[in-house]
Image (cartoon, rainbow, N blue to C red):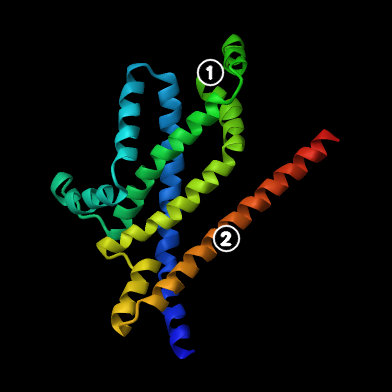
Amino acid sequence: MTDIIYYFSHIGVGIVLTLKLLAGSLIIGILFGTLLAVLRYNSGIGRILINGLISVIRGTPLILQLSLIYFTAPYIIGLKLSVISAGIIAFGLNSSAYVAEIIRAGIESLPKGQFEAAKTLAIPNFYMWKDIILPQVFVNIFPALINEIIALLKETAIISIIGGMDIMRSSQVIAAERYEYFLPLCIAGLYYYGLVLIIEWIAKKVCFKKQSINQISEQ
């Protein structure tokens, strides 16, 4: 029993880094992914470049992207990135490619008449996207975004390969220290599973609130 408490307390310290990585990369992923989706929809030649960028990001392993950013940044830009900075950039850029595809599907699900009506009314592109298109898109893609957040949470475990003391790395350190791998890794799994359940619970609460507001507005 003492060992279990010890494992839970020491592995739990890694939650701080895991949540920092998730929050930072999620912000980058949603903002940059939205920008890519909008620019791809509006631009001509730029669409080819954006499609190529998204294809490369989605077609290469995340662990490779993280290694490139962390180990080659000092030679390319002359700046040594911290573990958490490299992780947030790598995970954020990787997530942005998937978010861009999710948003693309959301845009294509909207009636084309909304774009035509906005052009007829001479609504500037910025306000059309900000006030008309994107609010509807994010409502439609909300479940897919939650899945992306959950996937991103689990992908943050890759930070352990460059020494980030997240949940996964903390469990590995304890396992090596005690020469016991099964229990520490199971506890790490419980922490990840618990975080996933919390995200799902928050998502359900948000969906329930939206449904309640819609029902009230319809009455």
Mark sitting on residue 198: none
In 3D space, how far apart are the residues under numbered discs 1 and 2 (Cα atoms)? 41 Å
Left or right of 77? Residue 182 is right
Label 1 vs label 2, nearer the camera: 2
Residue at the farthest front position? 182
Q: Under tag 2, what secondary structure?
A: helix
1 and 2 marks in contact (CB < 8 Å) = no
Up the image or down, 134 lies above or below 15; here it is above
Q: Where residue 207 appears, x then y in whole percent?
A: 67, 46
Residue at the farthest top position? 120
Q: Which residue is mark 2?
A: 197
Residue 166 visible in rendering: no
Q: Bin the neighbour count of mark 2 within 10 Å (Cα to Cα): few under 14, some 14-19, many 20 and up.
A: few
Q: Point out the image quarter for the C terminus.
A: top right
Q: Under tag 1, what secondary structure?
A: loop
Choose between 22 and 126: the one closer to the eye: 22
Q: Amino acid at mark 2?
A: Leu
Q: Bin the neighbour count of mark 1 within 10 Å (Cα to Cα): few under 14, some 14-19, many 20 and up.
A: few
Mark sitting on residue 124: 1
Q: Amino acid at mark 1?
A: Pro
Residue 161 falls in image quadrant: bottom left
Residue at the farthest left position? 75
Residue 113 falls in image quadrant: top right
**Residue at left offset 70%, top offset 43%:** 210
Choose between 158 and 117: the one closer to the eye: 158
Say whether disc 1 or disc 2 marks the residue closer to the N-terminus. 1
**Residue at left offset 59%, top offset 55%:** 200
Up the image or down, 183 lies above or below 131; here it is below
Residue at the farthest right position? 219
**Residue at left offset 53%, top offset 59%:** 196
Q: Where residue 58 appears, x then y in whole percent?
A: 34, 39
Q: Where residue 45 appears, x then y in whole percent?
A: 32, 17
